[in-house]
Amino acid sequence: MNQWGEMEVAPATAGAVPAWPDVVDGLRRVRHRADETLRAADAAGRPFVQPRCGVGGHGPMRALLTGLAEAGPGMLSITIDSHTRLRQFDTAARVLAEDPARLNGYPLVAHGWRRGRELTRTVDVPLEVRHGSPDARDLFAVALASGITSFEGGGIGYNLPYSKDVPLRVSLESWRQLDDTCGRLAAEGVVIDRELFGTLTAVLVPPSISLAVTMLEAVAAARSGVRCLSIAYPQGGEVHQDVAALRSIRTLARRYLPDGVAVHPVLHEFMGVFPARRADAEALVLYGGITARLGGATKVISKTRQEALGIPDTAANAEGIRVAAMGSHELLDFVRLDQARVEEEADWIQREVAELVEPVLAASDLADGIVRAFASGRLDIPFSASVHARSEVIPARDDSGAIRLYRTGNLPLSDRSRRRNAALAERAARGRPIDAITADINYFAREGDPR
């Protein structure tokens, strides 16, 4: 065991991280902390906007953060390159030296913590690391040394949607060590925000599956001493269902998490196929902002008008921040929903989550319970890239556009839940299911009314 405790840390490039006391002292000196920003947004009752952003070079990354800061985000992201995500630190360093533009994100480990600290001092908002790594311990150590106070990911959500053959036991153990480090920091008065990636594969993710995964990760993190959790949910597209899911996050957290853990619902704006026409794309971005406010989200992860065209440029990303923020403007407070419909959706979502997670939580060892549940299909993720998820669950939209479970696989849902999903997903059975599912994936990319 080293000075960092159980979490082994040996970054391959740009020098070793500082000693633990120096890291703790550096975090205490950070001007803008993620947990404070999240609490302020909750107190104000309106979500702030955070974009995704990441480029390879250090100078271009600083310029990108500076340009986006002018649009008024509440937090900014450092999206990490794919080599670093897979712990290919030497490859990331080589590509950085040869041509930084070839990297699809910022290689923080290769740049090192001193440059990371330059990024945190570049803007007057907190930074969050977003990546997709099943084992992020070295990246996390460099992020902490950089003064970054928000870190995304978890042992399920950053494994099964991204990796082909990383055993769940391995990813769950690496994230347990990471969260134990957050617990050590919390005991020393430094709170790190841990965001859980409920977006999963981002393709027709049923709300109960998204929330079941994040609740299990949240329980594991809380047991390690994590005291600030941002629980993310992907916008499905039907506003009553999305608002019900967002509102359910706090309810489920009160049910399954101990007192003293701050929980912040997060909406990822629609991550499926985006419309190519600018007006349609901007309308969808605004729609996400409105959904986040109605659902009581603390923050919304924004999209842009260029999503269908490739990686957005700085101008489009900044405009996406502004358009998403419009959804929380007080002039739109007149927008109302059918509350009875929202409450009915919330009741069913919470019922399904309970049916999925409570058998796993009853296991004597949570990690072992999660591994066994995915192996047997009692937990599952649609369209997973991993051999460690069965992907037997098939989602489909109902006539309103809400996402249902067309095939429930081996999920331990009650007969009532199965019958309801089957009845509502009947639309997919009217023709060829593959045609319905393809149309559902392209729901917002079709011309005219998506229905």
Image (cartoon, grey):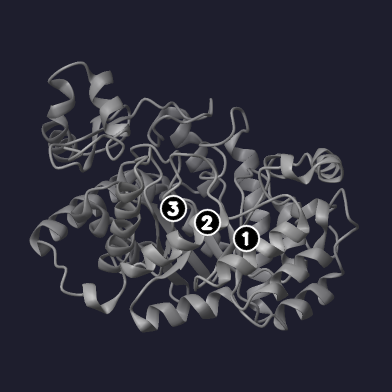
Residue denoted by label 1: 179
Cα distance between the residues tagged 3 and 2:
34 Å
At mark 1, the secondary structure is helix
Q: Is residue 400 left or right of residue 311?
A: left
Q: Residues within 10 Å of mark 2 (few under 14, many from 20)?
A: many
Relative height, residue 241 to residue 318 (above, below) = above
Residue 290 picture location, percent across and down = 28, 64
**Which amino acid type is shown beneath numbered disc 1?**
Asp
Labelled pair 1, 2 in contact (Cβ < 8 Å): yes
Q: Is residue 371 left or right of residue 202?
A: right
Q: Is residue 44 left or right of residue 158?
A: left
- Sequence order check, earlier mark of 3 and 2: 2
Residue 143 picture location, percent across and down = 72, 62
Q: Is residue 385 left or right of residue 271?
A: right
At mark 2, the secondary structure is helix
Q: Measuring 82% from the left and 76% from the top, which residue is drawn there?
A: 21
**Which amino acid type is shown beneath numbered disc 2?**
Ala
Residue 131 picture location, percent across and down = 62, 49
Residue nearest the observer in this picture, 304 or 353: 304
Badge number at residue 220: 2
Looking at this rendering, what residue extends furthest in the right direction?
A: 15
Decide if residue 225 is in sight here: no
Relative height, residue 137 to residue 46 (above, below) = above
Badge number at residue 377: none
Residue nearest the observer in this picture, 306 or 92: 306
Badge number at residue 304: 3
